[in-house]
Amino acid sequence: MKLLLIASLAVMTVACGGETTSTPSTATPVDESAAAPVEHETSAIPAANAEALGVMRDQFAIVEMAPDTSFLSANERAVINKLNQVGVLMSEIYLRQRSEMNPVWREEIAASDIANKDIMLDLFDLHFGPWDTLDHNKPFYGVTPMPEGAAFYPADMTREEFEGWLEAHPEDRDAFTSGYTVIRRDGDGLVAIAYSEHYREWLAPAAALLREAADMTANASLKNFLLLRADAFLNDDYYASEMAWMDLDGPIEAAIGPYEVYTDNLFGYKTAFEAFITVKNPEESAALSKYKDFLRDMEANLPVEERYKNFKRGFESPIAAAYQVHGGGDNVPGVQTIAFNLPNDERVREAKGAKKVILNNVLGAKFDRILNPMAGAVLVDEQAGLLVKKYMTGETLFHELAHSLGPGSITKDGVETSVSAELKELYTQTEEGKADVMGAYNILYMMQRGEMPAAEKDSFLATYFVGLFRAMRFGINEAHGRGAAFQYSYFKEAGAFEWDADEEKFRIDFPALEQAISDLTRDIIIVQGDGDYDKAEAFLETYGKLDANAEHIIASLTYLPVDIQPVYADAL
């Protein structure tokens, strides 16, 4: 899982994660050999005027990133430059995972005489398609809505058709629900096509580049991961390379492959290709790494019955404080990732835990440009000055640690399954909110144990509370935004804050908020641990919404960028 930091053209807006500014190429045609592309309507009529396009562009602050890489050897720089090329190929694939018509549409815009062509192309590249990720994927070019299942499924396929097919063809279930297949029509039926086949045009050269990088590096653990990941690109078996990634040791921290399922809003089955090319800061990593030693204690301290706790997962969970130097795929468009917790394979998590990587340069830019100045609009004056950057970092880290805690593999009706399989497309919404509130719960636990200064509790709680508004600007139909919304509504019901009518801002009741964090941690763990789709849906319908005061605050934040657009060098 990954953590994003994220209005509105006039009302609320939305987002999904991403990274750098590498522009997707449009020279490569859609691969029609693997399967017929999903049919989409096209239109030469833009859906947004010049003013609206300008507002969209202004929502992202362009930030030149120049992370310190002076400590790298010439060989290490050469390896990173090779991996950057793989990141570009991940972008090519993800562009088509959002829509296989994207290259065609971009070429159509480029060849047109539209007056706003330049800014439209800029926005197309920023969002990886003609849909505004900050406005519920509303099209700004053409009239085609983005399918819930993106291009992972036929655009006209319904949930009922998919599930009906599996009822009639149970032998297809594993392939159809795999994270590494696309679903296409085959005459009157449906067929699953492996990623390695459907995206071979880009995966084959990506695998070759990984092998070239492996030949160049003197780091044995990096070499092993790159070679195994190259194999996985061509056979769709990612387990061995995920295990190898957990063992990476050295200054280069690279996560490359199909990981997150946020783009699949139909079922949450299909993974998106992305790349994080980063370098580790050993001193900062060491300062954070002590907290992984408390993971087992954190699990034991969760405020639920023992049957909801999960001691089967590994608690190895390395932590890296890193600086991103390049990105690709799902890590590029829209709102930027500030940290990630991978892999998502529950088998790897049970064997080794999961690695948490904090992207310090991205996080720092967001605190300075968005979160800290936002406090004055969200909190009453006497509380607005409490925000501290280290608690943005702390909540980010403990959010990622929380992804490794609580229910994962579960037993339901006597059958071994998982929370994600049972909650389907609702899983990411419950999981991101769970990670937020459980992260806060565990920071308070660290303060109770004396591992963090308890005297700074109010600063932490204020930083955490304002962070909910940053995420709710994503829009509450996006996983992180919906997760923040259900925290906000739950805390409101618990009396954890009040509306100051004079200042038109919120006043936190710190003791009440602390208790509500514990109560919500309990309740969301139970929702997940029961694996009950209907219960999860009812919980989200009850709490995953905003009141007039929250909407007022969000609407008032238009003077702040919603997010940043980092610019990285193509090569070191």
Image (cartoon, grey):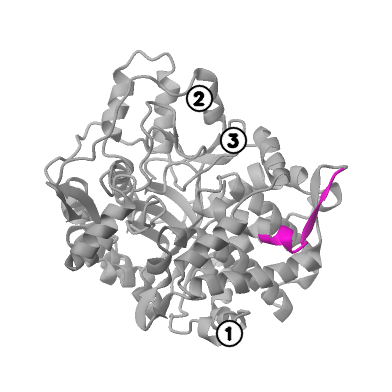
Badge 3 or badge 1: first in the primary sequence:
3
Viewer can see residue 175: no
Whether residue 449 appears in this view of the structure is yes
**Which label number is shown at residue 281?**
none
Residue 437, percent across and down?
Answer: 62, 65
Task: Label 3, secondary structure: give it.
Answer: loop
Residue found at x 59% / y 40%: 562
Tell me the residue that label 2 is attached to.
Answer: 53
* Badge 1 amino acid: Glu
Q: Is residue 364 left or right of residue 254?
A: right
Residue at image coords 43%, 65%: 423
Please provide percent x and percent y for residue 508.
79, 57
Q: Which mark is residue 8?
A: 3
Lower sequence index among marks 1 and 2:
2
Mark 3 vs mark 2: in front: 3
Extent of the magenta region: 490-501
Q: Nearer the viewer, mark 3 or mark 1?
A: 1
- Report if residue 497 lies within the magenta region: yes
* Vertical placement of residue 308 versus 554, above or below: below
Say the numbered circle drawn on residue 305.
1
Going by the numbered disc 2, the residue's amino acid type is: Leu
Who is closer to the viewer here, 81 or 346?
346
Residue 543 x %, y %? 62, 58
Which is more N-terminal, label 2 or label 3? 3
Question: Is 127 or 454 nearer to us in this picture?
Answer: 127
Q: What residue type is disc 3 on?
A: Ser
Indicate the quadrant where residue 173 lies.
bottom left
Q: Is residue 208 left or right of residue 82?
A: left
Does 451 appear above or below 331?
Answer: below
Label 1 Cα crowd, 10 Å radius (few <14 / some 14-19 / many 20+): few
